[in-house]
Amino acid sequence: MANRSVVPFGPQHPVLPEPIHLDLVMEDETVIEAVPSIGYVHRGLESLVKKKDFNEMVYVTERICGICSFMHGMGYCSAVEKIMNVEVPRRADYLRTIWSEMSRLHSHLLWLGLLADAFGFEALFMQSWRLREKILDMFEISTGGRVIFSVNKIGGVLKDMPKDMLKSFVAILNDMEKELSETTSVFLNEYTVRSRLEGVGIITKEDAIRRGAVGPMMRASGIEVDMRKTGYAAYSDLDFEVITSDKCDSLARCQVRIGELFQSIAIIRQAVDKIPEGEISVPVKGNPDGECFMRLEQPRGEAFYYVRANGTKFLDRMRVRTPTFANIPAMLQTLQGAQFADVPLLILTIDPCISCTER
Amino acid sequence: MEDIGNNVIKIEQVELLPVIMEKKNDDWRLAQICCAFRDGHYEVSYSFAKGYELTNYRLIVGKDETVASISRVYKSAILYENEMRELFGLGVEHIKVDYHDKLYRIDAETPFMEKEGE
Amino acid sequence: MKTMHKSPWLLHYDGSSCNGCDIEVLACTTPVYDVERFGVVNTGNPMHADIFLVTGGINSQNEDVVKQIYSQMPDPKVVLAVGTCACTGGVFKECYNIKGGVDTVIPVDIYVPGCAARPESIIDGVVKAVSLFQRKHEEEEKKKNGRHRK
């Protein structure tokens, strides 16, 4: 029997922009077991509900994570709106949808870049991030912020996007689509990339359910679940297919995310066509009382919000179950039996967001 | 078992494991476990999802009572259960991988409980 | 060693930030902003690094990591705190697990505020860090030379 050794991985590692620590139990070059230890980014922001009132919490939830910041704010606001029976104006729903899809675009491009960096394809990393800057410019024009926007509020949104602006965004996205298909075809067709991704990190359909995987991780294992189909915000009016793959490996996860990039552009186009005129927010009076479970589809998968209010300004409990938290057990499974050189890649294929996970 | 609205079904301690087994055999996935502390007792919510369906089970646990771990049925419950114990001090028995209150390795002891007393 | 001060290497560590500043720091190294044109190179190894760029606040867990990375870096070194959380603790200051800004554990030379800090201000901070590093480096050289003469 070969000797077993334990290799520490992280928290400060060149491939990870964020700190997570894994103890890898190795037998020669093969990983036998991976033991995670988290807590490097744990802030305890859920406990802030006792110190900040429910309106201020919108800004705290937006800072759970800088990548899906808009959707965190939106999920929290939707949950509180549901408790207070507030009907958000339709235009606000559409604006939220457009911003959500823009967030998905920028998040997936970010992930593609990091993945390219993980297998050492520096030029591809730069290309993906160059494209991502165009989305960030659109965010800056429409909200004023590049990563943290603070445009959500309970009862609607704070900023409107005029018609000209929306039209110019669609024009930018149309141009981008060509460049995007050039860049993404490298991921899907280049044999050096394929050799790193194909057949690596397999999660079967049964395992995905048993381990509670969500989002692209789950869809790449052939499960057709996308929370956008539950029809929150304006998604009920929009037409789109759930993108799945039944190959179950890292390449499948890459394919699903690339498919979603083009899908997001199509959704934004539809939303811009259909967006109604009108108010962008309604005044909200009183304090929330009751509880609500809210689910929505973030770039990384299903996020789960639980809000418990007691009729005062301060909430009893606010809990966020982020997609990465649900994907960690699946990630640990892919690591078992993997080659040491594939470890950074496998960690990246779940699109980890550690600051989401630890809150 | 009692439906208390908001898509929540209240269950008793003894019903927990049978309910979990039933969900497991029916291929539901564990969406989340959430703990809250109000009015001197814990509220533990287990959420299961299958396709687009969602069901929540609520367990009321007294301050000094313990609750059985479901990590032997749903392995992904390990993180949630360790989190509940570390942040709320809720006794969860026989977790499959026990971090012994060292999941987040925080200095404060059961920080979510201290806030209640203020 | 004489030319070293012209191209200091940069090490980025994410404390307990929300990721916002992190991805802005990374965005600074990509084509649109490209901070590497000022001679800095992003590295993953503390032993090679001259500028330590920290985002996010400090909690009990990453306190030791930050201290360790700082001690592994060769002298002279410059510490750059990027983002409001790294400067003071920011919106998370009242959380039970946040001790405060980076200066609670290691000395900080340059503060870059902003939530999230904009790439322009990060670049400004890095440029300031480069010139500070050069100054520190010259002082170090002078000290060394003085010692030799005795």
Image (cartoon, coloured by chain):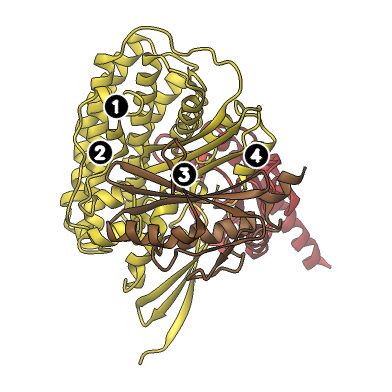
Chain colours: A yellow, B brown, C red
Three-letter residue code for mark 4: Leu
Residue type at mark 2 is: Glu
Position of residue A208 measured from the top left corner of the image (x, y, whole percent): 29, 58
Kindly identify which residue carries mark 4. Answer: A48
Left or right placement of residue A162 versus residue C41 in this view: left
Instruction: Judge by depth and name the residue closer to the eye, C36 or C114.
Output: C114
Q: Which residue is mark 1?
A: A235
Look at discs 2 and 1 and give the one toward the viewer. 1
Q: Chain of mark 4?
A: A
Q: Foreground residue, A143 or A70?
A: A70
Say few, some or many: other residues with alpha carbon within 10 Å of mark 4 (under 14 / 14 to 19 / 20 or more).
Answer: many
Viewer-nearest of discs 3 and 2: 2
Tell which subunit mark 3 falls on: C
Residue under label 2? A260
Residue drawn at (23%, 58%) of the image: A205
Q: Amino acid at mark 1?
A: Tyr
Q: In whole angstroms, how far apart are the C-alphas of marks 2 and 1? A: 15 Å
- The quadrant holding residue B52 is top left
Please say if A224 is above or below B96: above
Q: In this view of the protein, can residue A244 be seen by the observer?
A: yes
Q: Earlier in the sequence, mark 1 or mark 4?
A: 4
Residue C134 visible, this angle:
no
Residue at the location (51% across, 28% down)?
A: A80
